[in-house]
Amino acid sequence: MEHTSVVVASKPTHLDSSSEGRQMICLDSVCKEFDGARKVTALDGINLRIARGEMVSIVGPSGSGKSTLLNLIGTLSSPSSGSIQIDGQVIDSLSDAALTRLRRDKIGFIFQFFNLLLSLNCLENVGLPLHLRGYPARKARERARELLELVSLGHRLNHLPDELSGGERQRVAIARALAYNPPILLADEPTGNLDSVTGEGILALICDLHHRFGSTVVLVTHDEGVARIASRRITLRDACIVEDEHT
Amino acid sequence: MILLRLISWQYVRKHRLRSLLTTIGIVLGVAIFVGMHAAGASVLSALSTTIDRIAGKTQLQITSGESGFPEDVLDRVQSLREVAVAAPVIEAVVQSGLRREGNMLILGVDMTGDRSLREYDLEAGDQDIVDDPLVFLAQPDSLIVTRDFAQRNGFVVGSKLAMETMEGERRFTIRGIMRPAGLGAAFGGNLGVMDIYVAQKFLGRGQRFDRIDVRLKDEYSLNQGQAALSQALGAGFEVNVPAARNRQFESLLHVYSFMVNLTSLFALFVGLFLIHNTFAIAVTQRRSEIGILRALGASRRQVFTLFLTESAIAGFAGSAIGIVLGRFIAKAMAGLIGNVMQAHYGIAERAHEIDFGTGLIAAAIAMGMITSILATLLPARSAALIDPARAVQRGSNQAFSSGKSSGRSIAAALSALLAVVCVFLGHSRVVFYAGYLSFVLAALLLAPTLSIWLSRLARPLLTAVRPFEGSLAADSLIQAPRRTSGTVAALMLSVGLVVSLGGLSSSTFQSVLEWVDSFLNSDLLVLASEDGTNRNFHFPDSLTPSLASLDGIADVQRMRSNKVTVKGASVLLVAIDMDKALARTSGHVVAGDLQQIYRLAAEGKGVIISENCGLLQKLSMGDTVEIPSPSGLVRLPVVGIVTDYLNQSGTIFADYEAVYQPFWKDRTVDMYKVYLKPNTSAESVKEQIQTRFSQQRRMFVMLNREVKARVMSNTRQWLGLSYIQIAVAMIVAALGIANTLLVSVTDRRREFAIPEIRLA
């Protein structure tokens, strides 16, 4: 496999208007600082473009800012400075309600610890984003069933998360992330809590879904093996992007 | 709705006991509110029904306090051109003497005129007794009863009913049975109608009527009739529509309503803290769940609404259970209110059906839901503002607030300052209460900080007693003030209420005890009615010398009590023998010289008022009191003020001979204070009085210790609501502790598991 390694400078990448239109995620000079007893800079002057349908992995040591970057892209938190665009929409000036709508309509999350609601069964967990969108209960249930069958869990519809294996739980979480076909899929250490065999199965599923639905996938991991499934790898160190390579 | 089922309901199912404990505050508050109000409203409604049914076609009623008025007043009323019908009435509630029947309303009427006002719809008996009054008059033992009363006691026409009258036991013959409608349904059916002249003897009224019921000629309006009657009779008479009789009872119930509202508000207030505490804890426990929802696309508004809806449902459920519980409380309280009203005011009316109006139910539900929603506003806001990025991180679900807030400290300081200004510089009652509330608010705002300080202070002691458990307990309090501060605040309020109410009840009880020792200091008390507060029965004054002449009796003092209207309020006029009272009294004088005030009052140069009368009616030494009497307005100055607990609205003491007789022209007595010669046995004199008089007349003789026991028992009954309040405070305090411990156990499972592992 041929690797193209690029060391990225901390300045905006200038793209022409046609390439701008193809971008799904754009970050310009984004900084994120956390106030506390001591001010911590989690991200410092990040410039990043991720094209529509691209699959990108973000790697780096612990504390390098990977998850913070993912949270900013997922609009779960806002930058201290700089600008972020999601699918052409500048999110800096959006109200919380508009941000919520954007997140609900365009972004699906896959977490390391699955973050399923333990009191809900698989169908209910997968149907939850649809309920939040105001789907009728029956329609949401049908869609959840389809998605669970898609991730090969058609036989576990009414099982509670505690009754599933780690891999199965992550499959439920993936099905939930795909509930309304979001154009962006954000995965934070999706195999971090799984054994290697199960992890490979989950990665294969993510790749398969990426190819079938054409979603833009951003995958955070500290595992080089996992990062290798993406066509582009971004390396973070000390709050900065130090490497952006296409594989 | 689906979110409620998926998210909220699951949480409630998982924490059933805590959810139940949380709603109990609302349940208690609503139950007390509904129960007490329904009981009061039902007793009032029963009274109103009785008044309506007895009134019949009566448009106006003429009264002159409780003493009634001489018979000649009837001629003056009948002579007015506006009057179509004027019928005299004697009305009294007496004990029926029948087991399980309790009280009975006796209506003494003059059949010659009364049929124009009231319909006597007889279903059995001789219609002649109604059609021809002479038949009724010719048989003075005639009594008409209702069908319900007859059926319950197996009476038919011709049955005999024995009743205690002022002339001893008399047997009445049932000569008519009324259908259960109209008049026949008054007083829950416990009604007996007899001839008015028989009633006068029966109740010891002499030649007096209690009331005259009037129907006006068609061409005169109610206002014209009222004006003409008032003008003709003078200021000593009251001319009112029948419904006005309800007002006295309403004003009495007002005192009860105030205490009821206070108790239910307190329970709801503490319930508010419990709910706030539970939801505040729930928000911290459910951070992860809220974070997931937010990440999946739930808006802040959705999260906020979700918590408020949960709270509203808890409030609704608590209210619904409270209403059901309130039904039981209402039934119990209707009896208690009836007893208290009868024991303290001589008004006997019982609710036969509990009236739950839709308005009351709606108010109760609204109260429960609003309390619950208010309690949840801040936790719901916190939930909505949770940072989803941090919330979805593993291990972030135990993030408690520090318990310190500069905003809260500033607000507490301002409230405390306002309290000091209001309490020490304000002169009105409103300002005082505002200051009191500010003080409570300041204490509540400081509760979290105080909890931390106290926990830090307690840590060394706890650690010394139980090194491991003690330090864990203290650290838990210090690290999670939010978990305990709500309960600390609730406990603070509860303990404060228990201490203040307990102190108030105790001091009231002590004051009444002192008053009983000084005022009711006679060796014996001779009463016309069993409880001393029912003023329907009277002795003739002619009994006085007979009583005084008995062996061993040194002195007999007469007492005649009547309710009169002074400055629009119903106060008790007590006519006594002032000269004799001076020799025996050791009462506490608030204003004036003991010797001088009794001397002036004995000469008819003034009246003595009770301290509460002075405060409530704004009367002080030298002020002129205007008392309506059948002979017109009596104007006398206040010559002394004493401590007295005979009546809540106040008491006016006047001399029996110098004031009461000339103006009321009523030679009756309802109580004698009997003082014995030295070395005379009270028991033997009591027996002597009973032997001498009990065959001739209705009479109750009580020893001093029996009187005191009765008064103190009535006082305890009156303080009953305070005891209920104390009980409620203690229940909610216990709930608060249970709630906090439950939350603490749930939150600290991991912490508790460590020592278990170590021990294993």
Image (cartoon, coloured by chain):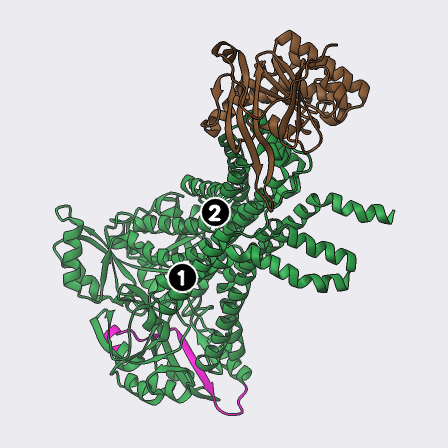
B90 part of magenta stretch: no
The one of B212 and B174 positioned closer to us in this rendering? B212
Of the two numbered discs 1 and 2 in the rendering, the one whose residue sits closer to the viewer: 1
For badge 1, the amino acid type reads: Leu
Which chain is assigned green?
B
- Label number found at residue A107: none
Left or right, B514 with respect to B105, comes to: right
The one of A101 and A38 positioned closer to us in this rendering? A38
How many labels, in total? Answer: 2
The one of B737 and A161 positioned closer to us in this rendering? A161
| Distance CA(mark 1)–CA(mark 2) | 35 Å
Residue named by callout 2: B34
Where in the figure is residue B348, as x and y percent of width and height? 42, 58
B676 part of magenta stretch: yes
Q: Which residues are magenta?
A: B661-681
Secondary element at image label 2: helix
Mark 2 neighbour class, 10 Å CA radius: few under 14, some 14 to 19, many 20 or more: many
Residue named by callout 1: B418
Where in the figure is residue A148, as x and y percent of width and height? 68, 14
Which chain is assigned brown?
A
Secondary element at image label 1: helix
Left or right, A85 with respect to B292, comes to: left
For badge 2, the amino acid type reads: Val
Q: State the residue at coordinates (80%, 23%).
A: A195
Q: Chain of mark 2?
A: B
Mark 1 neighbour class, 10 Å CA radius: few under 14, some 14 to 19, many 20 or more: some
Q: Where is B270 relative to B508, above or below?
A: above
